[in-house]
Image (spheres, grey):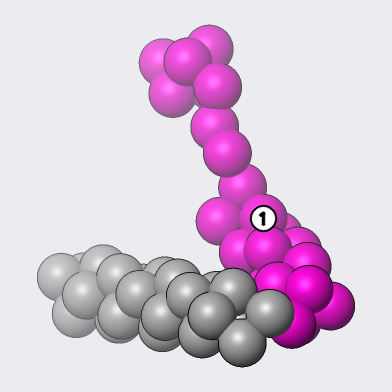
Amino acid sequence: MKASVTKTSLQLDDYLDLLNLAVSVGDEKWQKEIIRKLSYTYPVKTAAQMK
């Protein structure tokens, strides 16, 4: 189970690195695509959902 958590963290880090690259080259379409993928893969949980 610990390996799975580590793998997920690396994937998230990779997406954030790609997003930083997209921002630095000014590619807004790519930024939106990465953000969409992140929001789908890592949805935000509200406080009520975390209980």
Task: Note whether 33 is above or below 40 in the view shown.
Answer: below
> Does 39 lie within the magenta span?
yes
At 35% from the left and 75% from the top, the residue drawn is: 13
Q: Nearer the viewer, residue 3 or 39?
A: 39
Quadrant of the image occupied by residue 26: bottom right
Question: Tag 1: residue type?
Answer: Ser
- Residue 15 makes an appearance in the image: no
Residue 48's spot in the image, x, y percent?
53, 12
Disc 1 is placed on an element classified as: helix
> Does 21 lie within the magenta span?
no
Q: Nearer the viewer, residue 15 or 20?
A: 20
In this picture, residue 13 sits left or right of residue 47: left
Magenta stretch in the rendered image: 27-51
In this picture, residue 24 sits left or right of residue 36: left
Quadrant of the image occupied by residue 4: bottom left
Residue 10's spot in the image, x, y percent?
31, 80
State which quarter of the image contains the N terminus: bottom left
In this picture, residue 49 sits left or right of residue 34: left
Residue 3's spot in the image, x, y percent?
19, 80
Residue 5's spot in the image, x, y percent?
26, 68
Q: How many marks?
A: 1
At 61% from the left and 47% from the top, the residue drawn is: 43
Main SS, magenta residues:
helix
| Residue located beneath label 1 in the image | 39
